[in-house]
Amino acid sequence: MSEFRVKSIETLHAEFRVPGDKSMSHRAAILAGLSNGSCTITNFLPSEDCLNTLNAMQALGAEVEVLEELEGYGPVAMTIGGRSMQLQAPVEPIDCGNSGTGMRLLAGLLAAQPFTSELFGDASLSSRPMGRITKPLEEMGAKIETLGEKPGCAPLRIHGGKLNPIRYEMPMASAQVKSAVLLAGLFTEGRTTVTQPAETRDHTERMLESFRVRTIRDGNAITIYGDQMPQACDFVVPGDISSAAFWLVAAAALPGSRLMIKDVGLNPTRTAIINVLVRMGAHIIVAEHQTEGEAIGNIEVHGAALKGTSLLPEEIPNLIDEIPVIAVAAALAEGTTIIRNARELRVKETDRIATVVENLRLMGGDVTEFEDGMEVHGGKPLIGADLDSYGDHRIAMAFAIAGLFASGETVVKNTECVNTSYPGFRKHLDAIRHERTNPGDFEMKTLVRA
Ligand SMILES: O=C(O)C1=C[C@@H](OP(=O)(O)O)[C@@H](O)[C@H](O)C1
Ligand SMILES: C=C(OP(=O)(O)O)C(=O)O
């Protein structure tokens, strides 16, 4: 079992790129596989989550030709030959691994196919709620059995078929649910409208536009017109701001540091982490160099003594995956940080409210737990401790960052899981611990060029 052993650092001066965006890589594989031709995807994230989705699309008949592979990880550039919306029945159940995004988006697609298919995942994914997608997809006409030991959980047996368009009001702010319904809606003959209670990441809507699929946005209501053919196109995946977040926090909380993360996705539905760190006192300069489609740019951080803040309710969906590392920043800041309205954290890879609170307390942090979040009373010195990631990649990485600020040694056990979203994290961590100013772009390659 792999682990991180981390000691405190004096300085952080570095400039590098993080791997491709996880959300966009899933969607690029799916939409390219549905499209009417050959699509080249560059800077695809070769993490377990996204490779499972790519394999799923291959199992559904999409042809994948690898153009560039990173040894030890997987393909980072490829052409995907689309099926013109005619998927083939997979011969065996599809493995979604650890990925909620993969399973929920693929379920939307499979609900509309004229065959029965099965999706399964690991123990963590098999305990996450799937009723949030089976409900709207059944309302559209699919029949989905949840075969898990836990009610309403995976494996999913999906009896697909011709679907009806619906109007659906999502009870929770989830981009995965929104995307599952929109993808299913693409296969209907009418207009499907999803209304979200708060804005969530809009990569599906933007990528549909890149594939020339018409959607209409009216505030938090998104409508897709069915029966449209995604037009093949090429897509360059920007760096993942959720992966960059670990280093942004490390640099922000270390006075005198300077960090530049280059070519990272700056979609406004994902950048609340920057606003939060600025409110906490960090000096951050953002330079956008692509504004069409998905915004891309460089983020430069100069560290400072941080102070506590309150996360705004509307910020929560925008930074949901960054909350574990924001909690670490909060422990390093003077004063109190309030994180509420974040109940969704309880149904991620782990119950992230519980796992963050537990690990912060083991490090000497002062935290009050709430049903929907936590209050972190920062400024207490962090003490190195033996921690578990509980198999959750964000917990593993967030507490490696905490270890960079703790006295003694911090050991985070059970860290293989980082490969679900950030292959190469360990290399970047080692480089930063050894004060290398150029930790190397993801595996020393420049995959996205300015
Ligand atoms: O749509 C996506 O790509 C994602 C949406 C979020 O989940 P929810 O939609 O469940 O909030 C996020 O936590 C996940 O990492 C990726
Ligand atoms: C919650 C996450 O992913 P998913 O829901 O796709 O498993 C995450 O990456 O933090």
Image (cartoon, grey):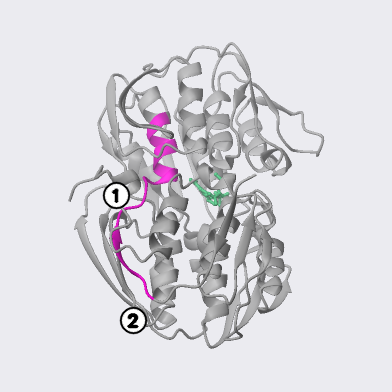
Residue at image mark 2: 256
Alpha-carbon distance for marks 1 and 2?
32 Å
Q: Secondary structure at mark 2?
A: loop
- The residue drawn where x is 54% and y is 41% is 101
Task: Please state if 113 lies on the left or on the right of 274 as rendered.
Answer: right
Residue numbers of the magenta segment: 11-29
* As drawn, 39 above or below 197: above
**Label 1 crowding class (10 Å Cα cut-off): few <14, some 14-19, many 20+?**
some
Tag on residue 294? 1
Return the residue found at the far bottom.
335
Q: In the rendered image, which quarter is residue 411 located in?
A: bottom right
Task: Please state if 26 lies on the left or on the right of 66 as rendered.
Answer: right
Comparing 419 with 155, the one in front is: 419
Badge 1 amino acid: Glu
Q: Position of residue 426 (x, y in %)?
A: 47, 52
Q: Quadrant of the N terminus?
A: top right
